[in-house]
Amino acid sequence: MPFYTLGIETSCDETSCAVLKGKDEILSNVVSSSLFRHKKFGGVVPEIASRHCMEQIQCVFEEALREAKVRASDLDLVAVTRGPGLIGSLFVGVAFAKALAYQLGIPVVGVNHMEAHLVANFLKVPGTNSERVQEPVPMVPGTYIGLLVSGGHTMLTHCEKGKITVLGETVDDAVGEAYDKVAKIMGLSYPGGPVIDKLARQGDSRAVLFTKPKQAERFNFSFSGIKTAVLYLLQDPKTGKPKPGAPSTADIAASFQHAVIGWLVEKAIDACQFKGVSDIVVGGGVSANSYLREKLARQAAMNDIKVWFPPVSLSTDNAAMIARRGFELHKNGIRSSLHMTADPGLAFNVK
Ligand code: KG4
Ligand code: ZN
């Protein structure tokens, strides 16, 4: 009998449900985004995000079952994002998951959203799209450096036999947040990551030289300085008026991207060498970035390091990765109780 896991993801502006067969076969992965509602604010508005999750969760769940051709009574496990994320959105998914598991008499397991981003690398890509179809699906390396790059987090982790240690993280903005804020400063649309990624291809990455932030801790990051530097390229800091002769937005985008991706790549390789590890697993929305994919792959190959990127379609928030992580936890005997609550600041390795 196949084992069916329902994944539920509502940590931010997406409402997603997925049905996973066994450990890596995605039968459905439905994502309803509230992005269009946040665009005019230039960032996610938590209240709008949680209301959207409340409105969408039932129909997204039903659609996920329909697409998967699975009935609710066929499900064996419910896996749900418990944190980190926005409390209002998280509550919707956790309450729904607990009620469903109770009704069906099946176990529920709470999942750490960031841990799930890493295991998005170890899922089969469904369909016949142009993305690489991993056959057979690669095995999770026993020890690896995790590079987590999203709208809320930027972290380097050391993962050994399932245990995750944080080596360093951002001291201010996350890298995705920096992309979004820099795009807003340049008058581009939200989310800024994909827009800058595309625009950068038309610009000159040597047009502006951004200063690398000095960090007391070897594996920490800082991205707020570069955001201010972009602002003052375009605006006079004293008068707030536009600066004449400022570089083009394409040149700024290319230079900004060259700088921040360069810092990520450099520290990820350094972390591998420091820990004597030969695999880097990348996860989070910014892992969709074309320049990061290209540059990290090149630098890693030069240092005999293997890099894992999730398929682009599984880089941003989705429930298939939550189902995969939940499946792993369940296999290791971990269950959550119906007293489980959402935890917006959930740490790693909390079961
Ligand atoms: O992981 P994610 O979907 O949500 C969070 O958990 O935060 O990441 C969203 C972030 C946004 O900041 C978005 O701008 C960024 O991922 N992003 C990108 C790209 N696609 C999405 N950043 C750079 N290049 C991209 N192609
Ligand atoms: Zn995420």
Image (tube, rainbow, N blue to C red):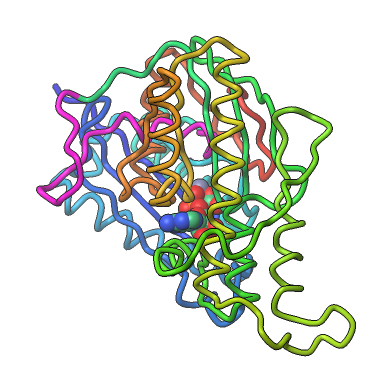
Image location of residue 330, percent across then percent down: 41, 20
Number of callouts in the render? 0
Highlighted magenta segment, given as a residue range: 111-136
Nearest the eye: 251 or 137: 251
Asked whether residue 172 is in view, the answer is yes
In the picture, the quarter occupied by the C terminus is top right
Please name the residue shown 62% across and 35% down the image. 155
- In the picture, measured across the screen, residue 207 lies left or right of residue 5, that is right
- In the picture, measured across the screen, residue 217 lies left or right of residue 308, that is right
* Residue 88, image quadrant: bottom right
Image location of residue 157, percent across then percent down: 59, 26
Image location of residue 221, percent across then percent down: 70, 41
Nearest the eye: 150 or 247: 247
Measured along the vertical axis of the image, is residue 148 above or below residue 9?
above
- Can residue 39 be found in the magenta stretch? no
Please name the residue shown 38% across and 53% down the image. 16
* Residue 333, image quadrant: top left
Nearest the eye: 326 or 266: 266
Measured along the vertical axis of the image, is residue 63 above or below residue 326?
below
Please name the residue shown 39% across and 46% down the image. 315
Image location of residue 63, percent across then percent down: 24, 58
- In the picture, measured across the screen, residue 62 lies left or right of residue 235, that is left
Asked whether residue 93 is in view, the answer is no
Measured along the vertical axis of the image, is residue 137 above or below residue 11?
above
